Amino acid sequence: MSECHFAANADGLVLSGDLVYANASAAYREGLRLFRGQAPRHLDLAAIASIDSAGVAVLLAWLAEGARRGLVPTVRGLPATAMSLARVGGVLALLVPSAG
C-alpha cells in the first residue's frame, strides 16, 4: 500500500510519498490529528510522488479544517497533477489563491 508521510517543521507540515485513493482516509485522519492545537501555516507538497483526485479532496478538507480554526494554510509545491485535477474540478483557486 502506498503511504503519505508527514513531517512537522517550524511553520507547517511537509508531506512526502503518495496522497492517493488507497491512503486518503488514513492521510486525512493523520492530517487532522496534526491539526490539533493549531493549524499549520503551510502544507509543503514538493516531495509528494503521486497524487490523485482523492488526494486533492484531502487537501481541500484540511484547508477547510484550517479555516474552521481561523487559519487557512498556504499550499506550497503543489504537484502539476494536483493542479490539473483542481483546475478541471474548478477548485484550483482554493489551493492556489493566486491562480484564481
Image (spheres, rainbow, N blue to C red):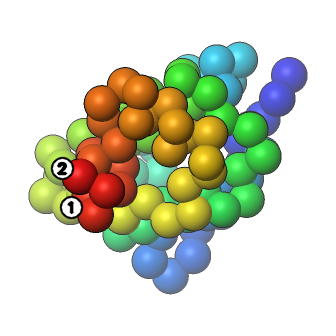
For the residue carrying disc 1, how many other residues have a C-alpha within 10 Å: few (<14), some (14-19), or many (20+)?
A: some
Task: Report which residue position mark 2 lands on.
Answer: 67
| Residue 95, position as x, y percentages in the image | 36, 49
Residue placed at 31% from the left, 35% from the top? 91
Residue placed at 60% from the left, 57% from the top? 45
Query: Observer-nearest residue: 77 or 27?
Result: 77
Q: Amino acid at mark 1?
A: Leu
| Residue 42, position as x, y percentages in the image | 42, 67
Q: Is residue 65 visible?
A: no
Residue placed at 27% from the left, 46% from the top? 94
Q: Image check: 79 left or right of 90?
A: right
Q: Image check: 32 left or right of 99?
A: right
Task: Report which residue position mark 1 lands on.
Answer: 71
Q: Image check: 24 left or right of 73?
A: right
Q: Secondary structure at mark 2?
A: helix
Q: Using the rendered view, name the quadrant where residue 50 is placed.
A: top right
> In 3D space, how far apart are the residues under numbered discs 2 and 1 (Cα atoms)?
5 Å
Q: Amino acid at mark 2?
A: Ala
Q: Is residue 25 visible?
A: yes
For the residue carrying disc 2, how many other residues have a C-alpha within 10 Å: few (<14), some (14-19), or many (20+)?
A: few
Quadrant including the N terminus? top right
Q: Do the residues under discs 2 and 1 have CB atoms within 8 angstroms?
A: yes
Residue placed at 71% from the left, 50% from the top? 48
| Residue 30, position as x, y percentages in the image | 55, 39
Q: Secondary structure at mark 1?
A: loop
